[in-house]
Image (spheres, rainbow, N blue to C red):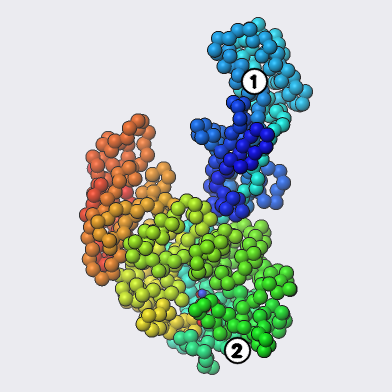
Amino acid sequence: VTVQRHIVIASVEPSIDCGRHPVKRIAGESLPVEACVFRDGSDVIRVVLKFRRAGERRATEAPMTASNPGLDLWRAEVPLPAPGRTLFTVEAWTDRFATWLDEFRRKVEGGLTDLGSEMAEGAALLDALAERGRGPDRKVVAGAAGSLRGAGDAAAALEAVGAPEVVEAAGRLQPRADAVVHRPELEVIADRPLARFGAWYEMFVRSQGTQPGRGGTFADAERRLPDIAAMGFDVVYLAPIHPIGRTGRKGPNNSLHAGPGDPGSPWAIGSDDGGYTAVEPALGTLDDFDRFVAAAARLGLEVALDLAIQCSPDHPWIRQHPEWFFRRPDGTLKYAENPPKKYEDIHPLNFDTEDRAALWAEMRDVLLFWIGHGVRIFRVDNPHTKPLEFWGWLLGEIRDRHPDVLFLSEAFTRPPMMKALAKVGFSQSYTYFTWRNTKAELTEYLTELADPGPADYFRPNFFANTPDILHEFLQKGGRPAFAIRLVLAGTLSPAYGIYSGFELCENGPLAEGTEDYKDSEKYQVRVRDWNAPGHIKGLVTRLNAVRRENPALQELANLRFLEVDNPQILSYLKRTPDGSNVVIGVVNLDPFHVQEGLVSVPLNEVEVEGDVEGEIDVEGRVGVVRGGRFGAHDLLTGSRYEWSERNYVRLDPAVGPAHVLRVEELEA
Ligand code: Z3D
């Protein structure tokens, strides 16, 4: 509660952790702000929303209007025309002239006469305002004071001073004698639309070649881009492209010894060929990379790079900055870990080193270097093993210079840290989605993520697989399981991704009970037939098109689950705020058996808003529901169904495990 003398600003929303962290929105939208503001007595108060772009000193003011007078709620919007940070707060003060006018009007309208002393008081107030003012406002106010004095009776006086232009001019001249400003100032980050909605495709450049045994290059990867664009992806995310260390290099299947021909893990950053600002010579040159980025851009694809802050024993920094690393008592360097995983081929950086200013600045410059090469998205490796303070600083440094840059947090750890990373500035976050496979798990997790509170700062990116995570569900369930997980990822979350090979339904595990791929391309070059029989590229392409064409699928917090009388069938509905686009997902979560059931759809959820007044009854309402029925158009198959409140579904995983239905008017 911010209170001073009379006025109370009890709350300003949205704010995260009492204003310690920014809320996130998309540029082009505006941020509705609601404040609870009141004062003792019945004096009239003015409430304004003040906002300024970060770095600017002068705030713009927008009057807040009473949105719920009974609860003293006031509302206004912060416009967010472009990406960047905006600071906002609320200021309120007593408007003495408006208070006088309000009382005077009630007396006049109540039929009281003998209001000479009230009129004198009003004139004095206006005089004082006129004295402070200049220009047109002063003229208006001074004129009003004159006519108040000259008015024959109270009704004429009210007519003279009650005009809106007088009230407005007086309002502007009003000294904010008892103004209260909410502290702290709150913040909103506006990101570009890709921060919320986009389809990601992850790949290793070295596996884009065509000749067995020969590693792929940027040129090979460039030749793959049309296929990826044709599937409808927005982002191509590359596993690290920097020189790979020799010392301690890992061999196939995570073995601790590499043979002479083994390429090593790309996350083992740095060799004699350079570190973070170099590219692995086997992939090509920096010029080749630039050409790759340009080719991607021509196809409407953005390139995301991996930022893995860790060094192979051969990274130049090990010699140049020995103090940046952790040394054991025997003088050897520690290797990195993310228990239970061990990364014997890399050394972690010490972010608390006395020389940390230099280390932090170096990391910033690395990002600026790649931004200079056209990169606007970074996927950050294991950020939870580095200090939050560092991320807050680094992301702020970049965002202030390049508000269009996006960061995806690859933190798989306990929820508070994952959320904290989002709060300090990551635009998107990996999630537990891969491990949520049952109806109960999905319902619970999505209910948590889609809650408007967390959704204000935590934007999930649902990867259906990653090079580190081949879930048992995919291992055992085969092609139907891939289709199930794809549709879930792409319709539940506005941002989602697959790691290449998913479209081919690759699912060979390293060993029973592990989530590692057999012969993972993390440690060896792979060459694939990207059109191998059994692929689901058609479904991927269709799904990405459906996502683009249906704005309801481009949001998260609009998710609600529908009742189905079968625990193997998950159904949910998403609608745009105006109801013009409503999509219903129905997914058979069982990759092995046909499942059938009844899906319940509350009709008010599918109804398009009409201007019908009063009690809304389903019959005869404006919109898509007619006689309790509406059209359900399966966007995956093209089939059209007639749906109502209860609907029979039957899904054969071998044929098609899901419906993605758009609510439409029934054809006449
Ligand atoms: C993951 C990275 C790979 C291999 C390890 C290897 C390490 C370093 C990990 C560390 C973080 C992140 C990446 N989750 O693939 O691990 O799996 O065996 O030791 O080379 O790289 O960067 O996705």
* Extreme-right residue of the structure: 131
Q: Say whether residue 425 is visible.
A: yes
Q: Quadrant of residue 148?
A: top right
Does 169 sit above or below residue 527? above
Q: Secondary structure at mark 1?
A: helix
Query: CB at mark 2 closer than 8 A to ligand 1?
Result: no
**Picture coordinates of residue 285 (x, y %)?**
61, 78
**Picture coordinates of residue 365 (x, y %)?**
68, 69
Q: Nearer the viewer, residue 219 or 74?
A: 74
Give the residue number, with chain letter if any, for mark 2. Answer: 247
Q: Nearer the viewer, residue 480 or 104?
A: 104
First in sequence: mark 1 vs mark 2: 1
At a point 28% along the width and 69% down the height, the residue shown is 591
Please indicate whether residue 561 sits to the left or right of residue 265 in the image: left
**Picture coordinates of residue 655 (x, y %)?**
25, 67
Give the residue number, with chain letter if any, for mark 1. Answer: 100
Kind of residue indicated by mark 2: Thr
